[in-house]
Amino acid sequence: MTRPPSPFVTDRFGPGPIGPAVRALVAANVAGFFLTLLVPSLAVPLGLIPAAVIERLWVWQLVTYMFQHGGLMHLLFNMLALWMFGVDLERLWGTRFFTRYYFVAGMGAGLTTILVSLLPFGFAEPLYVTLTVGASGAIYGLLLAYALTWPNHTIYYIVFPIPAKYFVLIVGAIAFFSSVGGSQSGVAHITHLGGIAAGYLYLVARRGALASGIRSQFLRWRLNRLRKRFNVHDGGRSDGPSRRIH
C-alpha cells in the first residue's frame, strides 16, 4: 500500500506513527477479544444479534459487537487494516472526526444488519438470530474513506497492485453478491455493505453541511459589501450623530 506524500518523512515502513485514536481502538479490540476468550459467556450479550436488540432491547450491542472477534486471525486482519488505512485518515482528519466516523460506520453497519434481518426474503431470515462480531463494518467504512480521499493510491491485494478506488468497488461487489446469494461462509457481508453505506452517507452529509456553511459565509460577505456600498447600517440606537438608520 502506498501512502500519502509527506514533506517530513522520506522513507518509512507502513503509514507512519500511529495516532491516539487508532492506538486506543486497537487496544480496545485486543482487550475485547481476550475478555470473551477468558469469559466465553460474554460472547452473546456483547456480540450483535438482531433478535436480542429488537426483543430484549440490548441496544449496546450496536457498539460492543465491534470489539469482539471470532478468532485470532479475524482480529489480526482487522487490526492490520485499521493500522494501514486508519493512521493516514486520522492524521488528515484529526482524532475527533476520525473517531466519530469510525463509530458511525461501525454502528451503521450493525443497524444495516438488523434492518436487513427483518426483510421477508430467504437470505435475510437467518440473520435475525445470527451472532455477528468484528470491526469489519467500521473497517470497510475506513476503506471507502481512504479510496475517496486517495483514489489512485495502490493497495496490494495479496500480490496484485490495485488502485484504491477499484479495490473498494471490487470488495463492495463481492460483499453484495455474496450476501444476496446467501453465502454460508460465516462472513457478515451485509455488515460490510452497511459499513460502506453508512460511511458514504456520513461523508456526503458532512460535505453538504460544509458546503452550506461556505455558501452562508459567502452570502454574509456579499451582504456586508452591499451595506458598505449603500451606507446601510443595522437598526437600533446610536449615540453618534453620523450614524444613519435605513
Image: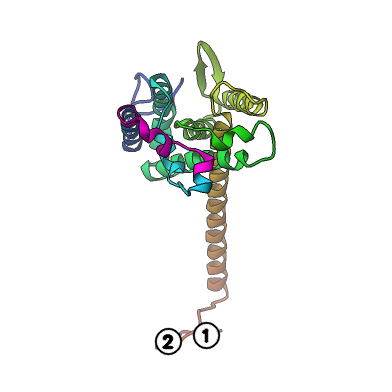
Work out how far the residue at label 1 is from the one at label 2, CA to CA, in angstroms.
9 Å
Q: Nearer the viewer, residue 60 or 22?
A: 60
Residue drawn at x 59%, y 22% as measured from the top left? 184
* Residue under label 2: 238
Q: Amino acid at mark 2?
A: Ser
Q: Residue at x 67, y 29 (%)?
A: 180
Q: Nearer the viewer, residue 187 or 173?
A: 187
> What is the three-letter code of the residue carrying label 1?
Ile
Let me know if residue 39 is in the magenta part: yes
Q: Position of residue 5 (x, y in %)?
A: 42, 27
Could you tell me if the residues under marks 1 and 2 are in contact, i.e. CB atoms within 8 Å? yes
**Local crowd at mark 2 within 10 Å, few (<14), some, or many (≥20)?**
few
Residue 1 lies, with reference to residue 131, above or below; the image says above
User: Quadrant of residue 89 in the image?
Assistant: top left
Residue hosting label 1: 245
Residue 127 in view: yes
Using the image, determine if residue 177 lies above or below residue 120: above
State how the image is colored.
rainbow
Query: Dividing the picture into quarters, in which one does residue 93 lie?
Result: top left
Q: Quadrant of the C terminus?
A: bottom right
Name which residue lies at 60% across and 39% down: 117
Would you say residue 108 is visible in this rendering? Answer: no
Between discs 1 and 2, the one toward the N terminus: 2
Closest to the observer: 23 or 118? 118
Q: Which mark is residue 65?
A: none
Looking at this view, is 85 or 107 the one in front? Answer: 107
Looking at the rendered structure, the secondary structure element under dot 1 is loop
